[in-house]
Image (cartoon, helix red, strand yellow):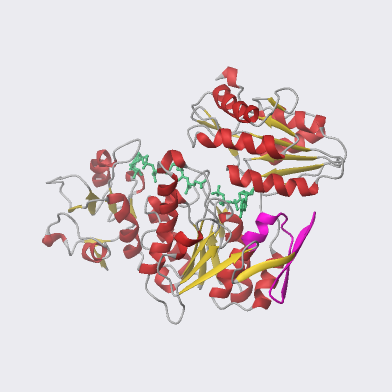
Amino acid sequence: MITLQQLIQSLPTAPIHMNQQDLETPVTAPVTEDNRLIEPGGVFVARQGLSVDGHHFIPDAIARGAAAIVGEQALQNLGVPYIRVADAQQATGYLAAAYHGFPSRGLIVVGITGTDGKTTTSHILHQILKQATGGKAGFISTIAADLGDHSEETGLHVTTPSAPQVQAYLAQMRRAGLTHVVLEMTSHGLAQGRLNGVEMDVAVMTNVTHEHLDFHGSWEAYRAAKGRLFEMLGHSQRKGAQPKVAVINKDDPSFDYFASFTADRVMSYGIENAADLQARAIEYAADGTRFMVADDAYQMQLVGAFNVYNALAALSAARGLGVSNVDSAAGLAQVEMISGRMERIDEGQDFLALVDFAHTPNALRRALDAGREMVEQGGRLIAVFGSAGLRDVEKRRMMAEVSAQLADFTILTAEDPRTESLDAILQMMADGCNSQGGVEGETFIRVPDRGKALYQACQMAQMGDVVMACGKGHEQSMCFGTTEFPWDDRQALRAALRGAPLQTLPTASSL
Ligand SMILES: CC(=O)N[C@H]1[C@@H](OP(=O)(O)OP(=O)(O)OC[C@H]2O[C@@H](n3ccc(=O)[nH]c3=O)[C@H](O)[C@@H]2O)O[C@H](CO)[C@@H](O)[C@@H]1O[C@H](C)C(=O)N[C@@H](C)C(=O)N[C@H](CCC(=O)O)C(=O)O
Ligand SMILES: Nc1ncnc2c1ncn2[C@@H]1O[C@H](COP(=O)(O)OP(=O)(O)OP(=O)(O)O)[C@@H](O)[C@H]1O
């Protein structure tokens, strides 16, 4: 039987206040930070959020049978044990880990962070580890979770699940007999402590560029959130002979920052700079990529230089886990196209149409570079994308600048405007195009309706051109106002290629 004492002991800092006589209280259901999910005998963690104060939900959690409450306010006489902590959000992961018996201690855990390439690197490493362990590897990424006994689609727009969910998933994987797990870790997830209580073995950094400055406040704070993964690695318990390995991109300006954290071994990878795993003799083709690392040859179905980086990150992590080069090469070769990433849409047209998930300035640069490689001589690169509302404002201009520099024609369109004015977002993007010498009507246009924007791109495309729809990738909805409308860029591009724009979204004027 688990008691409140066992949960409290997991916290790195002692509670501000609790009654000693409450320590033996049995906890018979999971820890949750959402009163709607509390089960009788569980623990409700109340915290101040950005939109509501979780302390308001304490009475309801108690009415639903909570065995104890953890919160930040000085409260008394709730009728159930109350533990006051300094930071309830950060405490949740540790408490949930303790409830589930610290599942990560029985698994080899790889965490992958970075601005771009986390999902792709997670998928590659998962495939390699499945190859090496006879299928005993799981993972959680933006797109999917492989929990050993079954796979799940993961949330709408949340990549790193909540702290209680992360621990529940890990417990499930352990029960299913998995030995290894790969976790995609976002800066939001790390900053909000959703990964607290996870004992890490390998930490991987893909790159750090501009993203989410709305949430983190500064680039340094954003990078520090990613650094939290490497800090966790240094503090994690050692599992048998497995060393703590930090895998870091040598071509990224933040290499030294990440290498400064404590680890048993730092493994570097890259293309431009000498590194432990340096790719050379890279051959890019429309249907895949080949490269060498020292004397070992690798080939994969993924395209684009950015995917060589992702492959190197995964190969380095695999090497840090003692996987043979033969298994790594076999696993890498098996990785299929990753949903919504450089995904080809073919309706028999004489130009190439791709859906990609690039939604940061750096990702767009890398994706358009890769797209350019596929343009036939004399052809054009046509980019269609937007930038999200209620998210990083600065990147709107930056992404438009990138496209003005790299694409022959840019169509600016809707991409989750949320409650912001789509017209205002498009104006900021148009300013970005103009600042790079773009001329509206000649090198770029605005088409607020995304279905029509894709249609227009397909109408203007000619033999040998490449049309790239960026930013929505695998996603299944688009947010206008506060409503998520069904949307799939693959479906929309397919409809556009067949000659009819998909029109399921509200137009800016109808909102
Ligand atoms: C900015 C952010 O990450 N916000 C997350 C955060 O919200 P918050 O701190 O403002 O919490 P809140 O909604 O005010 O609620 C406060 C507390 O009351 C609780 N509550 C709330 C309502 C209720 O009826 N009952 C209840 O108990 C909540 O569970 C919470 O514990 O905690 C909520 C509950 O866990 C999350 O749903 C919410 O994610 C929102 C949906 C979100 O959009 N997050 C995005 C930005 C995100 O995390 N993205 C990254 C990926 C980014 C990338 O692309 O790289 C991710 O990891 O997914
Ligand atoms: N290593 C990389 N460097 C730069 N851009 C990349 C890299 N890998 C992928 N990209 C670009 O970023 C897009 C998203 O890739 P991926 O889903 O792997 O990244 P992510 O970090 O998981 O993104 P998110 O945080 O939104 O889930 C791809 O469609 C591609 O355009």
Nearest the viewer among 147 and 379 is: 379
Residue at the spot x=23%, y=60% of the render?
13
Q: How far across and down, in percent of the image, does residue 2 sit?
A: 27, 66
Residue 305 lies in what quarter of the image? Answer: bottom right
Nearest the viewer among 186 and 43 is: 186
Q: Which contiguous range is marked in magenta? A: 282-311
Does the stretch in magenta take in 292? yes
Residue at the spot x=43%, y=81% of the render?
240
Q: Quadrant of the C terminus?
A: top right
Residue at the spot x=12%, y=61% of the render?
20
Q: How far across and down, in percent of the image, does residue 292 sit?
A: 72, 70
Q: Is residue 53 above or below residue 309?
A: above
Residue at the spot x=61%, y=75% of the render?
132
Residue lying farthest to the top in this orientation: 509
Residue 126 visible in the shown view: no
The count of marks equals 0
Does the stretch in magenta take in 408? no
Q: Quadrant of the N terminus?
A: bottom left
Residue 309 lies in what quarter of the image? Answer: bottom right
Residue 213 shown left or right of residue 119 in the figure: left
Residue 468 shown left or right of residue 73 in the figure: right
Residue 307 visible in the shown view: yes
Residue 87 shown left or right of residue 247 in the figure: left
Q: How far across and down, in percent of the image, does residue 153 sit?
A: 56, 52
Residue lying farthest to the bottom in this orientation: 241
Q: How far across and down, in percent of the image, does residue 106 sit?
A: 42, 73
Residue 77 shown left or right of residue 242 in the figure: left
